[in-house]
Image (spheres, rainbow, N blue to C red):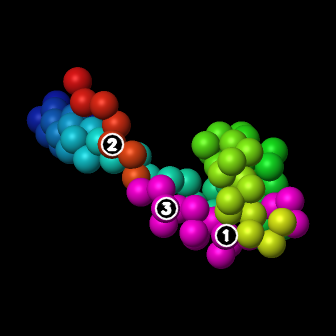
Amino acid sequence: MDRALWISTAVVLVGGLAIAAAHASEVAPKTFEQLDTNGDGYISRAEAQAGDPDLSELSHWAKYDTNKDGKIDKTEYGAYVAAHPPKTAPTQ
């Protein structure tokens, strides 16, 4: 790769990272699929503890496990996400 092309590529990558960092001030919740690590269609309490500790807190778990089966399905997780909008990350 010639020097000019390498420098141009580096500038584009650094600029892209700066833009991404500027937009990273909002921390989006994980998707249902990211939390359902075993792919059984439910989020277990252990999966929640590993991926979203806030959801696994007993008060949240009891509130959003509406059918009280000990796991969170996609509809229940949708209600949790709707009630917990993305958090704003601290800026420096």
Element at label 1: helix
Tell me the quadrant of the picture where the C terminus can be found.
Answer: top left
Q: Which residues are magenta?
A: 69-85
Residue 82 screen position, x and y as percent: 48, 66
Residue 16 screen position, x and y as percent: 23, 44
Residue 50 screen position, x and y as percent: 71, 40
* Residue that label 1 marks: 76
Quadrant assignment, res 79: bottom right
The mark nearer the N terminus, 2 or 3, is 3
Q: Amino acid at mark 3?
A: Ala
* Residue that label 2 marks: 88
Element at label 2: strand
- The residue drawn where x is 75% and y is 64% is 65
The mark nearer the N terminus, 3 or 1, is 1
Q: Residue furthest top?
A: 92
Mark 2 and mark 3: Cα distance apart in space? 15 Å
Q: Which mark is residue 56?
A: none
The mark nearer the N terminus, 1 or 2, is 1
Q: Are marks 1 and 2 in contact (CB under 8 Å)?
A: no
